[in-house]
């Protein structure tokens, strides 16, 4: 299988991390969205929405949206529970990630890291801070009760939230007031098959 994405994007890193945890062979094709590479006719034929990541299966079928890809890859593995309620818990956190976490933490990071915090984006950047800290507090409250977000076991819910939380400082967020979140980040990193963004960053990626 082949993945089209940018490893510095949390949504793409989610896929790389799970593939590593599963020991799944794959080919990674870097896509530079700032250079318009996700808007070419060839890319739009795979995902008309023009967004990364995109998973291309061995038979040529394509799948987009990072959390959908995670569910596809995790099916039948330890990272997606069998129970009806536990699966719903995983989805609950993944919807939270897309609607209550990413729009604040990931967007603030993009404005700062990729755009260089230009003056015309500063107000937008600052407006993202309150929502990002609210999301971190929600996570903190849960992680004070359970070791992982969906319960006692590491699931794709954790992968979804880890992707942008572990680089939240790049969006101006201080994680110090969230000790349970910091402890959880350490648990995720401690998996023997864990990989980091930095291991795969192309030389041209902003730092």
Image (cartoon, rainbow, N blue to C red):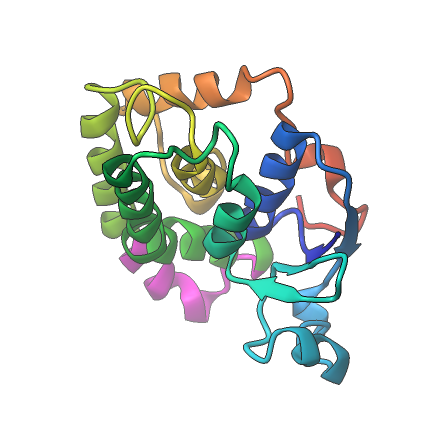
Measuring 67% from the left and 32% from the top, which residue is drawn there? 20
Left or right side of 12 for 118: left
As drawn, 188 above or below 159: above
Give residue 44's quadrant in the image.
bottom right
Residue in the foreground of this view, choosing between 175 and 74: 74
Q: Position of residue 141 (x, y in %)?
A: 18, 28
> Residue 73: horizontal and vertical position, in percent?
57, 45
The answer to if 45 sits in the magenta stretch is no
Determine whether, in the image, residue 126 is placed left or right of residue 55: left
Percent coordinates x, y for residue 89 in the rendering: 26, 39
Magenta region includes residue 118: yes
Q: Main secondary structure of the magenta part?
A: helix
- Quadrant hosting residue 116: bottom right
Is 207 situated above or below 162? below
Q: Which residues are magenta?
A: 115-128
Q: Is residue 92 left or right of residue 203?
A: left
Tell which of 4 and 122 is nearer to you.
4
Q: Disc count in the image?
A: 0
Q: What residue is at 35 percent from the left and 28 percent from the top?
A: 175
What residue is shown at x 54% (from left), y 77% (from top)? 49
Q: Position of residue 176 (x, y in %)?
A: 33, 23
Q: Quadrant of the C terminus?
A: top right
């Amino acid at each position: 299988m082949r993945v089209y994405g940018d490893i510095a994007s949390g949504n793409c890193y989610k896929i790389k991390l799970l593939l590593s945890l599963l020991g799944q062979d794959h080919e990674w094709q870097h896509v530079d969205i700032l250079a318009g590479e996700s808007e070419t006719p060839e890319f739009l034929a795979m995902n008309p929405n023009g967004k990364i990541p995109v998973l291309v299966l061995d038979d040529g079928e394509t799948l987009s949206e990072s959390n959908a890809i995670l569910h596809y890859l995790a099916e039948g593995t330890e990272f997606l529970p069998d129970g009806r309620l536990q699966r719903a818990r995983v989805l609950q956190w993944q919807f939270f990630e897309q609607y209550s976490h990413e729009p604040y933490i990931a967007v603030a990071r993009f404005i700062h890291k990729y755009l260089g915090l230009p003056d015309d984006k500063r107000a937008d950047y600052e407006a993202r801070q309150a929502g990002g800290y609210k999301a971190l507090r929600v996570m903190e409250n849960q992680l004070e009760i359970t070791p992982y977000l969906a319960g006692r076991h590491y699931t794709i819910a954790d992968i979804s939230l880890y992707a942008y939380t572990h680089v939240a400082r790049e969006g101006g967020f201080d994680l110090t007031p969230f000790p349970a979140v910091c402890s959880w980040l350490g648990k995720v990193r401690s998996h023997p098959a864990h990989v980091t963004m930095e291991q795969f960053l192309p030389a041209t990626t902003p730092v």
